[in-house]
Image (cartoon, grey):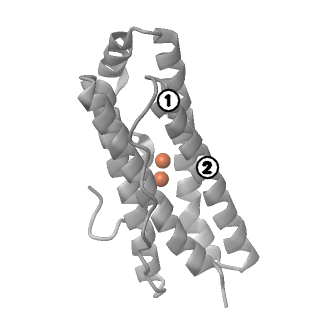
Amino acid sequence: MARFPEALNEQIAYEFAASQQYVAIAAHYDAETLPQLAATFYRQAVEERNHAMMIVQFLLDADLPVMIPGVEAPQTSFGNATEPIELALAQEKRVTDQIVALVALAREEGQLVGEQFLHWFLQEQREEVSSMSDLLATVERAGDNLLLVEEYLARTGGEESPLEAGAPPAAGGAL
Ligand SMILES: [Fe+2]
Ligand SMILES: [Fe+2]
């Protein structure tokens, strides 16, 4: 029995869990009246949801079973302003490791179409780890004054990544 389809279904849960974690972080910043930080994470949450739906579309296209597993509840309370972003960066690094393991498994099982599908996710992870560590550095540098972070995000945020153009199709359409 090939493990790759099962592992891909597990990744759907990790992407939805990432989405929920980002909703929780966004709501946290929204409650603190930090609208740019909130908007950043609301947007990230939608991206993670789209990643899950891209995997669903791949499974449908490949005529593989689609499981939509349940997810673990996200962390919703945070001790300080940097903690949510440290958590987000750790999450992106963990997802990178998961995608790398999936690619290795696809290769091991000769699933080259599946491997090619995952190449976009590798690029996406490089981008997301990089942008999250930039955000962490910015928040650390701002210290107690998160309004500096708000201003920074207002100036630099909202740029569409060039990667989105080459993204795999998402089931039901990307949001
Ligand atoms: Fe993702
Ligand atoms: Fe991500």
Residue ID at (37%, 16%): 152
CB within 8 Å, label 2 to label 1: no
Mark 1 CB near ligand 2 (8 Å cut) = no
Where residue 59 sits: x, y (%)?
46, 79
Q: In the rendered view, would you say 14 is above or below 70?
A: above
Q: Earlier in the sequence, mark 2 or mark 1?
A: 1
Residue type at the position of mark 2: Arg
In the picture, measured across the screen, residue 66 lies left or right of residue 100, that is left
Can residue 129 be seen here? The reply is yes
Looking at the rendered structure, the secondary structure element under dot 2 is: helix
The quadrant of the picture occupied by the N terminus is bottom right
Find residue 125 and report its horizontal and vertical position in percent.
56, 47
Judge from the rendering whether residue 45 lies leftward or rightward of residue 127; answer left or right. left
Instruction: Decide if residue 167 is in sight here.
Output: no
Q: Name the residue under label 1.
A: 83
Which residue ends up furthest to the bottom in the rendered image?
1
Whether label 2 lies within 8 Å of ligand 2 gets the answer: no
* Residue at horizontal 43 percent and vertical 81 percent from the top: 66
Pick whichever, 51 or 115, lies toward us: 51
Question: Is residue 175 toward the left or the right of residue 122 in the image?
Answer: left
Count up the numbered dots.
2
Q: Where is residue 51 drawn, in percent x and y?
A: 42, 59
Relative to 59, residue 86 above or below: above
Q: Where, quadrant-wise, is the C terminus in this rendering?
A: bottom left
Residue 133 or 54: which is nearer the viewer? 133
* Kind of residue sitting beneath label 1: Glu
Q: Residue at x 59, y 73 (%)?
A: 7
Question: Which image quadrant is residue 167 in?
Answer: bottom left
